[in-house]
């Protein structure tokens, strides 16, 4: 499931994710065989940093029952 979050962030931020991105998430519940998952991200803010500007996002992963499987934050550099 973490790879799906990383894929979403790379799609949104490209090299900024690969060169300066990361995440801090918590596993809330297990994914089970047959689960259909949805990965969501919401830009919370942008902040100046030494290497430019960093975008901070709230990210989560929910299953078809609406149960949160993963929740936390992710960040990436903006070009």
Image (cartoon, grey):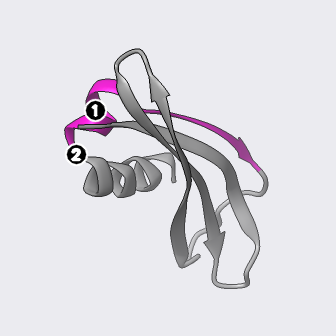
On the rendered structure, is 7 left or right of 25? Answer: left
Q: How many marks?
A: 2
Task: Identify the mark at residue 6; answer none if there is no mark.
Answer: none
For label 2, the residue is 14
Q: Which residues are magenta?
A: 14-27
Task: Where is residue 37? Give x, y as percent.
Answer: 54, 73
Between 57 and 60, the one lying in front of the other is: 57
- CA gap between label 2 and label 1 equals 7 Å
Residue 63 quadrant: bottom right
For label 1, the residue is 18
Residue drawn at x 55%, y 63% as measured from the top left: 42
Residue 14 quadrant: top left
Task: Where is residue 49? Give x, y as percent.
Answer: 45, 22
Is the residue 16 above or below the residue 66 in the image? Answer: above
Residue drawn at x 58%, y 76% as measured from the top left: 35
Q: Residues within 10 Å of mark 1 (few under 14, many from 20)?
A: some
Task: Where is residue 12? Give x, y as percent.
Answer: 31, 56
Q: Is residue 45 magenta?
A: no
Hey, which residue is sitting farthest bottom in the picture? Answer: 65
Is the residue 33 above or below the residue 12 in the image? Answer: below
Is the residue 50 above or below the residue 1 in the image? Answer: above
Residue drawn at x 41%, y 15% as measured from the top left: 50
On the rendered structure, is 71 left or right of 43? Answer: right
Is the residue 9 above or below the residue 38 in the image? Answer: above
Circles 2, 1 touching at the beta carbon (< 8 Å): yes
On the rendered structure, is 12 left or right of 42? Answer: left
Task: Where is residue 79? Give x, y as percent.
Answer: 23, 37
Residue drawn at x 46%, y 53% as measured from the top left: 5
Q: Residues within 10 Å of mark 2 (few under 14, many from 20)?
A: some
On the rendered structure, is 9 left or right of 33? Answer: left
> In the structure shown, which secondary structural element does the residue marked by tag 2 occupy?
loop
> In the structure shown, which secondary structural element does the residue marked by tag 1 occupy?
helix
């Amino acid at each position: 499931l973490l790879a799906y979050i990383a894929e979403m962030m790379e799609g949104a931020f490209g090299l900024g994710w690969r060169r300066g991105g990361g995440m801090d998430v918590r596993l809330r519940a297990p994914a089970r065989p047959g689960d259909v998952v949805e990965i969501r991200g919401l830009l919370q803010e942008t902040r100046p940093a030494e290497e430019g500007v960093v975008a901070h996002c709230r990210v989560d992963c929910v299953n078809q029952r609406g149960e949160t499987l993963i929740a936390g934050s992710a960040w990436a550099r903006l070009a």
